[in-house]
Image (cartoon, rainbow, N blue to C red):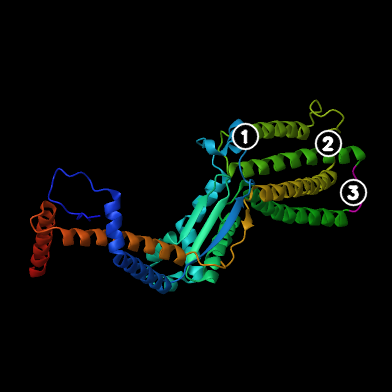
Amino acid sequence: MEQRPIGNDSSTEALRPLSDYLLVLIRRRRLVLLNTFVVAVITAIVSLILPSWYTSTASILPSESGRSNMGLMSMIESTFPLLGIPGVSAPSEAMLAILTSRRIAEEVIVANDLMSTYRSRSLDDAIKTLGKRSSIDVTENGVLRVQVEARDAERAAAIAGSYITYLERYNQEVRTTSGRRMREFVELRIEETAVTLSDAEERLVGFQREHATVEIGEQARAAITVLAGAEAEVIASQIQLGILRSYANETHPSVVELEARIREQQRVLAALRAGDDSDSPGTSPSLGELPGLGLELVRLMRGVEVQSGVFYLLSQELESAKIQEARDTPTVQVLDTPRPADRRTRPQRKLMVIIGGLVGLLAGIAMALMSEFFATTDEAHPARRSINAALSAFREDVARLRGR
């Protein structure tokens, strides 16, 4: 069978059948195979020269503690997290913002001495490099995933671990909750109340030693207990109001309700001090009817009772504040601890060699067809003239650039 050349001057000739191209590739198979082999070998050598990179991954499950109760909206958002309801922020989104912040990046860089590792001239350059080699995102299930890539497997795991460490530290030290503010406020007031109670007890003991013969009746003692309890309630309510005002404004419903309660308690206390029994049936007559030394003793005893009641109420508030602080403080639950990778992430040498071989094969086929084309066509062929014109223009452009 006569072989037809791949190039032909006839413009009316239809496209060549596939068999013609197969015959060309068979005739020039050495060129195709050699080109494929050379490109694959070069790719393999390059893959061996390229440095190995390792990836360490950590998975974090944000705690639901500290999340405000937002009623129906919170319930809907927790049931359908993909809806993305405005104004309802998931804990994972908050932790994502913290992990991707500049503050955490700076702490991770300093802790792992990444400026020298990345050979960065400034902290900003190191932050940019860290951002390129770190991937922090939230999965569809709300799990926070931290991936860090480094040339050393141990270093990659250390950097990923630093993200978790400084996230936990940020939660404990910076994200101050209402429970923590309450605890700190109550602890301070307990210290002040303990000092005041101690002074009141010392004054009472000193008075009793100096005036051992002074006695008061059972009714006066009952009046002391009632008045001391009322005063202690007022003081405790005022302390609670101070706690609320540390993180809530004056129009907050809890503040308004507590202010109304304090006004009512103060009204009852004023009535008790004036001897008005209509608001407290069954109490004793007015303490002002007692003699001078007896009245002084009653006042000292009442001071001790008041401070003891305040100290007791503050102790209860402190326990509640500690429970609330533990409930409010967001914690980090690590699902997957970052560990050194056993295998490198890149370069993927096998895949590179396969891709290189395919590229070499395609390039070899193109070279074989072009060689056949130039071997079977003369200078008068329209396509040949177009190619030669393009090559000439290219050479002229290169020469012009060299001349500059």
Res 381 quadrant in image = bottom left
How many residues crowd around disc 3 within 10 Å: few (fewer than 14), some, or many (20 or more)? few
Magenta span covers which residues? 212-216
Between marks 3 and 1 in the image, the one whose residue lies nearer the viewer? 1
Mark 3: which amino acid? Val
Q: Does any portion of residue 393 appear in the rendered image?
A: yes
Residue 235, x across and y down, in percent: 70, 42
Q: Which residue is mark 2?
A: 289
Give percent across and percent down for residue 198.
Answer: 77, 56
Nearest the eye: 385 or 300: 385
Q: Which residue position holds label 1? A: 75
- The residue under the point 71% across, 42% down is 236
Secondary structure under tag 1 reads helix
Instruction: From the image, tell me which residue sits under label 3.
Output: 214
Callout 2: helix, strand or loop?
helix
Give, as a three-letter code, the residue at label 2: Glu
Residue at image point 56% right, 55% down: 174
Placement of the N terminus among the 4 image quadrants: bottom left
